[in-house]
Image (cartoon, rainbow, N blue to C red):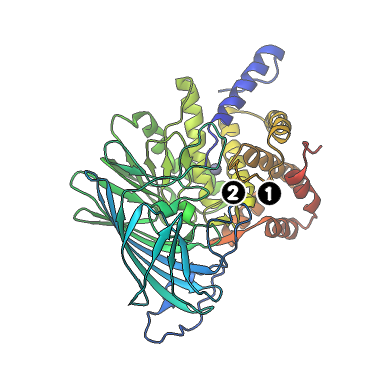
Amino acid sequence: MRRSWLPVVLSAALLTAACTDSGPKPRATDSAAPSASPSPAGPDYSAWAAGRSTPVADPVYPNYGNPGIDVLHYGLDLAWQPETKTLTGTATLQLRAAADLTEVKLDFSKAYALDKVTLNGVAAGGTVADTKLTVPAAVAKDAFATLVVKYHGTPTTVPMPSHRGDAEPLGLTVTEDGGLWTMQEPYGAGTWYPVNDQPSDKALYDISVTVPDGWSAIANGTPKGQDGNTFKYASTEPVASYLTTLAVGKYKKETATGPHGIPLTYWYRQGTDDKALPYLRKSPQYLEWLEKHFGPYPFDSAGIVMVPSTSGMETQQMITMGLPEADSDADFKRGFEADVVHEYAHQWFGDTVTTTNWNDLWLNEGWAFYAQHLYTNERDKVTAKQWEDWARGRDARLREKIGPPGKPKADSFAESNVYLCPALMLHQIHKQIGDAAFFAMATDWAQKNRGTNQDRASFIAFVNQHTGKDFTSLINTWLDSPTTPK
Ligand SMILES: [Zn+2]
């Protein structure tokens, strides 16, 4: 998720400094195959082995997710009717019981009526209450099961647990003209399908969406073509639920080719998103810059879908972008490009390598924010020293106002401290080991951990092992100190 005001603030601060003190001027998963299925008549679950995870209970949002369930694959067949604002869905989940289960409990919106629920082909009663679907069926630990849920209803959003100025409701949002879009970090995927909505349970996805003539449907994953008015997408690399996306609207589509042939798709609304277009079209350059620093783009397609939000989200293989509010055209240009680079950087840091739990959101945002600023510092000819001076000033105020980034409060999701403070921590490591060792470490972190979840302990172990130095104290201090470390 982006922080749109920060690059603007940086440029303003530097420009002010240049005017007043004539300082230097800125020119412009566990991938083991599931063991044999104990139900010999069932499907071959090894086909979805890449979706196997080690789910955990979330320490910040324990009401979301179920550590007893490991969903391997979601098959979502959806149809959207703009006139009646009705979403009709069949969700087919191949799952593994990660513990002995007496019931199958998933996150799902009570806005939907259940039309039919089956478990392993047998009709199973199901109820939706509060934010949970409960299916009363026992599944033994490590057994596989196929849950099919047919449902329909009008989507409703859930509040974002945040004090951010740009906070918007989470989940599938219906626009006045009958379109759809979603952003759902840290949770909210249950507003459109039954889901184990916690980042440690990554899974594979096949999504098909049927819309009326003249409408387009866009989702995360690799585009798999269009069959009449049905749009298809497949994620063959594991995806965390907060990184899935769905948008329906009267879109224009543009295709392009990124570095070494990566297919790119830009979806935009003519007349509405025109000022974003030059930056969507610069995607090949952004990806090239990111690959130079962090190794190959980790997926087999990329793209951006524009939506009526003021935020942006790093949804996997298809970034979801709104137009930020900007004071001037110049601010928009600088800020929006930084935002797009930020969401692309997340494909390496957050998407292929994902935080295990929401306490370690800094692990996603610190890297993405640092990558974004390395890019804009190069673009704006801002030196590392200028950047650090600016960032230290902000860091001090953020720690004082919001606290250190290592233990965020549940009601203050994604405040600025989890972006800037860990980026400054990465900068300290960068300065100590130099460019070559730092970018080799960053590249290996993303490339060798593809498709996994990671947390603070595994990050510290990785950095120490990779650099041959002990950064334990430096990292913990930057994550936990109430004041800016020296
Ligand atoms: Zn972000």
- Of tags 2 and 1, the one toward the viewer is 2
Foreground: 451 or 322? 322
Q: Amino acid at mark 2?
A: Asn
Residue 199 percent coordinates (x, y)? 54, 57
Please identify the quarter of the rendering in which residue 428 is found.
top right
Callout 2: 10 Å neighbours few (<14), some, many (20+)? many
263 or 313: nearer the viewer = 313
Residue 376 drawn at (x, y percent): 57, 33
- Residue at image position (68%, 21%) is 24
The quadrant of the rendered image in which ligand 1 is seen is top right
Q: Is mark 1 within 8 Å of ligand 1?
A: no
Q: Position of residue 480 (x, y in %)?
A: 75, 45
Q: Left or right? Give the position of 357 relative to 89.
A: right
Q: Which mark is residue 296?
A: none
**Mark number, residue 364:** 2
Q: Earlier in the sequence, mark 2 or mark 1?
A: 2
Disc 1 on helix, strand or loop? helix
| Ligand 1 within 8 Å of the CB at mark 2 | yes
| Residue at 58% in and 47% down | 293
Q: Amino acid at mark 1?
A: Phe
Question: In this rendering, does residue 118 appear at all?
Answer: yes
Q: In the rendering, which numbered label is found on residue 438?
A: 1
